[in-house]
Amino acid sequence: MTSGSKKVLIAVSELYNPRELLNTIRVFRKRGLAFDVVSGQTYIQSEDGPQQIRLKLTYATLDTRNLASRYDAIVCISGALKPTMHMWKNKILADIIRQMNEAGKVCAGICCAAPAVAPVAKGKRMTSYDMLRARDWCEINGAIWTGKVMEVDGNIITASNEQKTEDWAEEIVKAVQQVK
Amino acid sequence: MVKFVEVKPEDVKKVESKARGRFTAPILQEFLESGLYMVKIDRKNDPVLSKRPLMSLYTGLGQTVRKHQMPIRVQQVGGEIYLSRIDRTPDGQEIPDWKEKLGVKPKRSSDIEPDEEGAVDIDDIGQ
C-alpha cells in the first residue's frame, strides 16, 4: 500500500527522540509516504546519544508560503523537554500548523510535542505526555485534553508516548490518504 | 499587626556567618587547575568546609559537576570526599570521548556541536 504523491512535513525537536523519529520515518517509508523534516537547526542530535542527523530544512530556510499545497500533514515529534517546549511557542511552526489546519490537512503530534498542535485543536479531543504544563497549554488553547494513549479527532492525531509511535504513524498514513 | 519586642544589641547572640552562595564551583575549578589526577579534600582544616555536613558538600559538588559538565568524578569513601579526573588516565593521557562515557547529555539545542563527519543525512535514515 503506497500513498501516491502525498507528502508530509515532519517538525522535530533539535534534541530528538530517536524511537519516535526513526520509527515514524520507517512507517512512512514502508507506506510510500514522502516527507521532509524540519527543525530549528541543520544538525539535530539524539536526546540520549551522540548520533546526529543532517537536515536539509530549518524553520529559517523553509518557504512557508502555500505550504498546504505542498504538504498533506504536519507531524510534530518530540525529544528533550526544553527544545520540545520551545516548539509549542515557535511562531513559524505555529503558522505552519495554522495553515495546514485551515486547509483541512492533518495536524499530528506525539508525546511532549503534541501540545504544539493545541492552538488548532480548539474544542477537539487531544492527548499528550502526562505533564501538567502540557495539559495546561492544551486547555489554555481550548483543546479537550483526555490523557489517553492516542486520540484521533478529525484532523488532529495525537499520542501520549513513544510506545505508541507505530500505531500513531499508521493512523497519520490512513488520515493522509483520505486528505483531498 | 506585628508586635515588636525591644532588645539591646548586646543581648543578640552573635552567630558566625556561614559561607554564602556557591562555594563548590571554586573548589572544583581549583582542582582542575591543579593538574592533579586524584585528590582528597581536607575538610578539617578549612574554616568553611569544616562547618558543612559531609553529605551537603558531597551532593553540592556532584550537582555543580553535572550542571557545568566538568570532567570530575566525586566520591565519598569512609567520611572523606575524593575528586578525580575522568578526562585523562592516571598517566596523563587524555580521554577525548569522556563526555560520552559519562553519559553527559545535551539539554538545549545550543549544546549541540555539529559533527559534520559523523552526522547521517536525513535521506539515509530508515532505508
Image (tube, rainbow, N blue to C red):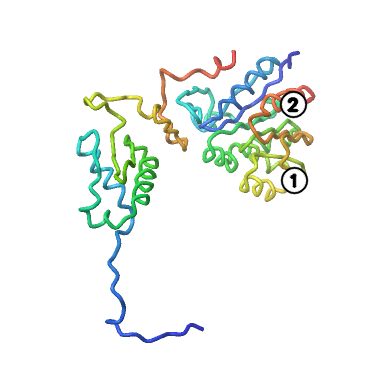
Residue A107: x percent and y percent? 70, 33
Residue B48, position in %: x, y? 26, 56
Disc marking residue A171 = 2
User: Which residue does the image show at 66% across and 24% down from the upper left?
Assistant: A8
Image coordinates of residue B87 in percent, x first then y, are 30, 29
Q: Earlier in the sequence, mark 2 or mark 1?
A: 1
Residue at (78, 36) in percent of width and height: A153
Helix or strand or loop: what does disc 2 sit on? Answer: helix
Asked if the residue under mark 1 is in contact with the one under mark 2, i.e. CB atoms within 8 Å, the reply is no
**Chain identity of mark 2:** A
Type of amino acid at the residue the image marks with label 1: Ile
Q: Residue at x 29, y 39 (%)?
A: B83
Q: In the rendered structure, which amino acid carries the disc numbered 2?
A: Glu
Disc 1 element: strand
The circle drawn on residue A135 is none
Q: Is residue A110 above or below residue B21?
A: above
- For the residue carrying disc 2, how many other residues have a C-alpha within 10 Å: few (<14), some (14-19), or many (20+)? some
Kindly identify which residue carries mark 1. A144
Indicate the quadrant containing the C terminus of chain A: top left, top right, bottom left or bottom right: top right
